[in-house]
Image: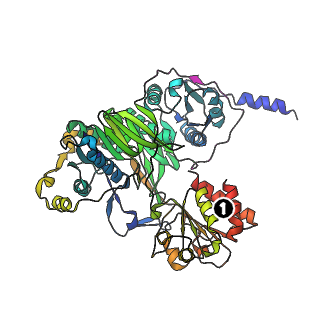
Amino acid sequence: MRVVVILGRVLDPGGITVNRRVGRIFINREKYILQPADRCALEAALRIKDSADCSNPTDAEVIALPRGPLPDDDVLRQALATGADRAVYLVGSPAQADDAVMARVLAATVEQLGGADLVLTGATTLDTGQSQLGPRLAEALGWPQIVDAWAVRAAGERVEVVCQNKTGYVIHDADLPAVVTVTPGSLKPRYPDGVRLVNVYKGVGEIAAALEQWEVADLVDAEFLKPLLEQRGRDFPPMRERGARASGTVDEMAQAAADALYRRVSR
Amino acid sequence: MDTSYLDLLMAQQEEVAEEATGGGGVWVVADVADGAVASVTLEAIGTARTLADSLGAYVYGVLLGEGITDLAPTLYQAGADGVRVADHPALAQLALEPYQKVLADLFEAEQPEVVIFGATAQGQELAPRLAQALGGGLIEHVTAVSLDESTRTVQAAFPIYGGEYFEIVACPEARPQFLTIEPDAFPAPFIDSYRKGEPTLLDVEPVAPSVRVVGEAEGFEPPVVPLAQAPVIVAAGRQAGDLELVKQLATALDGRVAGDRGARDAGWIEAEQIVDVRGVTVAPEVYVAVGIRGDTFHNAAIEEAQFILAIHPDPDAPIFEMADLCLEAEPQEIVPVLLELLG
């Protein structure tokens, strides 16, 4: 079984401050972390590899690919250290590549790899909240998709996925190959292995050879690399006004609180 | 005054006549929940109406499901100029392939300029696949739109880091422009009960869905979210009086129970539930402080919360300087009323 997992990075929200008054974003500490949902997808992929159904190591292979243009391959090194078997760093992805472009590039990469049984990625990104990469990739590959998975089990020709609906958790199943997007916080991710981590950064041993570099230009024609979306600016919410007091009787105050809570919690 | 005459006159004026167009238009794919059109769809039609009026285009609604033809008048009343209905047993449940086939065929023929979905399970599933299949751009979780009229391009804002700021993005060349709009982000349109029209029924070619629902996931337990990442926290302080009320409020809001150091001293909570810079620093969407006075350490630990509701009897309690909504009242009095209102 070959599982491809698509990983991206995000600026750690703890390191940025947004000043609404001046409408600026200050980056106090430029630190990138693996997208939380992608981290869960990696964990899901490694659990499939660990599972009894894939006990033959030659059968179980986890390949990490980047979600977007990465200026360095830190994310993929982390994936290798955590347990991925191979990682392909896509050199020359256009800097502004959006999900439509990346879906094409990744579909071509999966084909170049000789196909896969399962593609896993995060259901949503921490920063932009966009969830389109997984379904777009599924369309580009012409595969079925299951979005927002809480647990993934792949065996034989089928994948079983636990999804949440209005009443609880249900099991969906589809034939392989398929694309599954994993909900952030759904699985407890494992830590990278210390020895692998050192080796992958030092470029020592087998693991260092597992990080490959492929040219995007060899995979997709340049005409398909033009992003569809362009940024037109930023908008900042109004300054937060603290200290607003509810007035009136206890009933009126409770009503004001209930209205405020209902608006925020009902989603 | 003869109001029946006025009614008749208005009804005649508001009869919607859909004209044959050479493609284009702003399309809304309706979400149907519990046999009714979802409110996000009505908001989407209101938004589509505003965009279409500036573009000089028509607004079309698409209804998919089984036994949903009766819902078409609601879309007309909300502002649609035309409604397409795909009513078929194969569409009874949301399933990717049957829904995608109907919509892809329809959009292939009609060449829409803009297609709006609700940012719901249906929109999340269908919009990206259709966008990729038709070569369109997609902006998800949109909370505001404006129009670049010279290029007929929709500029849409969506939240970054859960609303810290908004990115404004446009899709200048590729058509259709797909959007999924956040529920409650746009105003509900005026429902004009005199507006009516005749929906067009679409032929449905049943396609087998590739994903099957096997059944309930029995015994599945999602992992426990650490307090620091919980989206809703109800915290107790010494003035809360009764921890049971706090627990009930947490259950009603589907949130986690926590407290300040005073609550720990009272033996109400465990050490790992203390919200304090020396304990757990939190950043929930909603933080309810029940009877917490709010010392420096506690207030610093809740600074990142998006909305803080504080309940305390003392008008000078420092927590009130932090809170977005302050209730000067005894928690024992107001929390039961609040619980009743939250149902």
**Residue A224 falls in which quadrant of the image?**
top left
**Outermost residue to the left:** A205
- The mark total stands at 1
Task: Give the secondary structure at mark 1.
Answer: helix
Return the x and y of residue A64 as percentages of the image width and height.
25, 48
**Outermost residue to the right:** B1
Which residue lies under the disc numbered 1? A257
Task: Based on the picture, tell me whether residue B204 belongs to the magenta stretch.
Answer: yes
Mark 1: amino acid: Ala
Residue B337 showing in the rendered view: yes
Q: Foreground: A241 or A53? A: A53
Return the x and y of residue B30 as percentages of the image width and height.
55, 35
Return the x and y of residue A257 as percentages of the image width and height.
66, 62
First to last magenta residue range: B184-207
Q: Main SS type for the magenta part?
A: loop
Residue A133 lies left or right of residue B180; in this view the side is: left
**Residue B197 falls in which quadrant of the image?**
top right
Q: Foreground: B157 or A172? A: A172
**Residue A260 falls in which quadrant of the image?**
bottom right
Residue B223 lies left or right of residue A213; in this view the side is: right
